[in-house]
Image: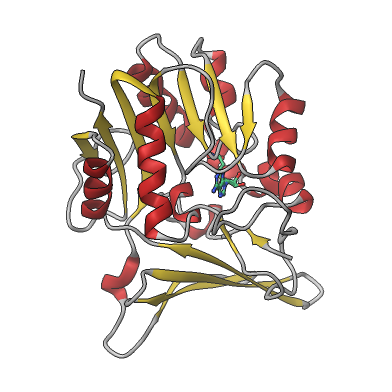
């Protein structure tokens, strides 16, 4: 068992998109953990059939027009009529409505079951099943994007750098790379503690633990069913600072263009919990 939703979700009350993260094999006693498939060499766990089957329903709040609409506006505008490539395209939450706006979208997705779900919903979106740090897609793109914290699924700095380089390889001169990512919540850590709760509710309690020396983190989830049964799931990530993203972009030959706190373009401040960042490939 290898995957888990991060169920901060609709009742969390926080607008920021905190994303799915995966658990190490064998740690889950429930939830949406899947299997680890044979596949590309990556630090990412591979999302399995169960996670893929439940993804859209479990993340319904991220499909809500007020969440998705501003992201689509932003991305369609940056694509500027050119083709777009989504890293970690998943079941097409963003890619499908973007394609319906007339953007020619392609994708890279590590999980075959996630890609299958996308293609079952809508054919005609080319998807390469592979690792977003290394896989290639034919063509040159005016926009490459990775949303909902998915870059954190790569759990080494080297792979994250490679992800930026892979974006740069796929971009046409002048094209943009967009990353939507949360800001690690370590400001909320009291001295001597390593855990930060992100949701405490009747049916779900979740907290993150951080290793400050390695930038590795784990999201822990306890779910209580109506019959009182409690299940535990955990998922791992590597957190990245916004400034570290800028350095990765620079290593990939991309120039910083903008950073906002959300898809609406609100200013990014020291209190922002999320950022939407744009880098540009020189012409
Ligand atoms: C939170 S989901 C996001 C899916 C979609 N982008 C969305 O916004 O709904 C994270 C996705 O990242 C994919 N993923 C994880 N590691 C990956 C990797 N190394 N390369 C490509 N995709 C990866 C997972 O399989 C999953 O589909």
Residue 170, given in percent of the width and then of the height, sits at 41, 26
- Rendered residue at 48%/17% (across/down): 139
110 and 276: which is toward the camera: 110
| Quarter, ligand 1 | top right
Q: Is residue 174 left or right of residue 193?
A: left
- Rendered residue at 70%/21% (across/down): 122
What sort of colour scheme is used for the picture? secondary structure
Where on the picture, by quarter, is residue 235?
Answer: bottom right
- Rendered residue at 68%/52% (across/down): 47
Residue farthest along the bottom direction in this orientation: 192
The answer to whether one can see residue 191 in this image is yes
State which quarter of the image contains the N terminus: bottom right
**Tag count:** 0
Q: Is residue 264 left or right of residue 282?
A: right
Residue 196, given in percent of the width and then of the height, sits at 40, 75
Residue farthest along the right direction in this orientation: 227
Q: Is residue 263 left or right of residue 18?
A: left
Residue 178, given in percent of the width and then of the height, sits at 35, 34
219 and 106: which is toward the camera: 106
The answer to whether one can see residue 198 in this image is no
207 w.r.t. 143: above or below: below
Residue 182, given in percent of the width and then of the height, sits at 37, 53
265 w.r.t. 142: above or below: below
State which quarter of the image contains the C terminus: top left
- Rendered residue at 22%/58% (across/down): 271
């Amino acid at each position: 068992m290898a995957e888990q939703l991060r169920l901060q979700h609709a009742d969390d009350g926080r607008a920021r998109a905190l994303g799915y993260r995966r658990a190490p094999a064998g740690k889950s006693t429930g939830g949406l953990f899947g299997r680890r498939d044979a596949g590309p060499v990556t630090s990412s766990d591979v999302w399995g059939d169960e996670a893929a089957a439940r993804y859209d329903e479990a993340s319904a709040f991220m499909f809500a027009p007020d969440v998705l609409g501003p992201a689509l506006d932003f991305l369609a505008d940056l694509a500027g009529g050119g083709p777009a490539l989504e890293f970690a395209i998943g079941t097409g939450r963003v890619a499908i409505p973007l394609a319906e706006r007339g953007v020619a979208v392609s994708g890279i997705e590590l999980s075959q079951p996630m890609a299958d779900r996308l293609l079952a919903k809508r054919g005609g979106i080319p998807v390469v099943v592979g690792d977003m740090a290394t896989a290639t897609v034919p063509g040159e793109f005016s926009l490459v994007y990775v949303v909902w914290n998915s870059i954190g699924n790569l759990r080494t700095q080297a792979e994250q750098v490679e992800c930026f380089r892979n974006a740069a390889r796929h971009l046409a001169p002048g094209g943009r790379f967009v990353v939507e990512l949360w800001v690690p919540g370590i400001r909320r850590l009291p001295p001597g503690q390593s855990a930060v709760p992100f949701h405490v509710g009747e049916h779900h309690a979740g907290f993150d633990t951080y290793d400050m020396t390695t930038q590795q983190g784990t999201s822990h989830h306890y779910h209580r069913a109506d019959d009182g049964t409690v299940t535990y799931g955990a998922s791992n990530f590597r957190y990245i600072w916004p400034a570290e993203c800028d350095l990765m972009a620079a290593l990939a030959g991309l120039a910083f263009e903008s950073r906002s706190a959300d898809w609406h373009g609100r200013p990014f401040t020291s209190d922002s919990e999320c950022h939407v960042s744009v880098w540009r490939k020189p012409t």
